[in-house]
Amino acid sequence: MTSDDPVRRGGREAQRRRTRKAIVEAAVRLSAGGATPSIDEIAAAADVSRRTVYAYFPSLDHLLIDATAGALNEPPVEEAFADPAIADDPAARVDALIRTLLKYSPQSLPLGRRLIRLTVDQPVDESQDPPAPRRGPRRVEWLEQACEPLRETLAPESYERLISALTIVVGWEAQIALRDVRGLGPQAEEEAITWAARALVEAAIREHEAGGRP
């Protein structure tokens, strides 16, 4: 089994996600009282080294913004996914994710703009295989939850391509483009993002049904 083996790569990526999640959750817990925790306090609470924290977050500000955004969005997103009426409908689940994120965008988008500024010029650590993303996996995990009904239906390559495509149209970057470049208001913004996301989901389903490329 080589270092490029998909199973081994997937295992490393899953471990990185767990470590990052533990760090963020520790930051959320320590920040709950209103005080700003130090990197050393967060590392101890997450049971990792200070060096490990800095491997995922180049600065305390980066970590605290990420933690605040997660604490704001995660409970309502999980509640939206728990709706039994959309349990088997991936397009409806993606719609619900978008509506929920946009509902909280007045609070979360300013955090997103700050986080993008902190990460856009962050150098990639090419010593990691595969290189770690510059931002956390929260958006990808939510999109995977939304598209869970398609996981066993689509070929693995098609499913991963769908998640990657949805990552482009669901999130802070899409909102910033629609607001700053297109000048859209909240309603038009939601309509555009929802339409684009639904088009991608439906295209993946049609491709599968037509026996197209995986």
Image (tube, helix red, strand yellow):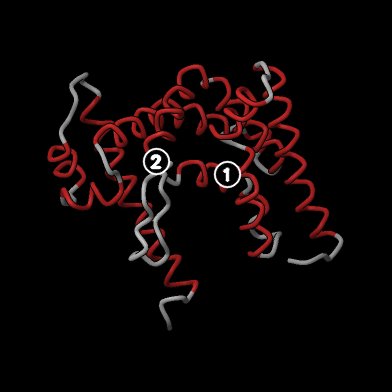
Q: Residues within 10 Å of mark 2 (few under 14, many from 20)?
A: some
Residue 164, relative to residue 191: is it above or below?
A: below
Q: Which residue is mark 1?
A: 143
Q: Residues within 10 Å of mark 1 (few under 14, many from 20)?
A: many
- Residue at the spot 25% in from the left edge and 23% down from the top edge: 32
Give whichever of 50, 80 is nearer the camera: 50
Q: Name the quadrant of the C terminus.
A: bottom right
Whole-number angstrom distance, CA of label 2 to CA of label 1: 21 Å
Q: Position of residue 173 (x, y in %)?
A: 55, 34
Left or right of 106, for residue 136 = left
Residue 49, relative to residue 105: is it above or below?
A: below
Q: Quadrant of residue 175?
A: top right
Residue 17, relative to residue 174: is it above or below?
A: below
Give yes or no for contact between labels 2 and 1 (Cβ–Cβ under 8 Å). no
Q: Name the quadrant of the N terminus.
A: bottom left
Judging from the image, what secondary structure is the residue with disc 1 in? helix
- Say which amino acid is labelled 1: Leu
- Residue at the spot 28% in from the left edge and 43% down from the top edge: 58
Q: Position of residue 115 (x, y in %)?
A: 40, 33
Left or right of 88, for residue 113 = left
- Residue at the spot 50% in from the left edge and 34% down from the top edge: 78
Q: Position of residue 2 (x, y in %)?
A: 42, 82
Question: Which is closer to the viewer, label 2 or label 1?
Answer: 2
- Say which amino acid is labelled 2: Thr
- Residue at the spot 70% in from the left edge and 60% down from the top edge: 154
Q: Which residue is mark 2?
A: 119
Query: Sequence order check: which comes first, mark 2 or mark 1?
Result: 2
Left or right of 122, for residue 200 = right
Judging from the image, what secondary structure is the residue with disc 2 in? helix
Q: Position of residue 29 (x, y in %)?
A: 24, 31
Q: Quadrant of residue 114?
A: top left
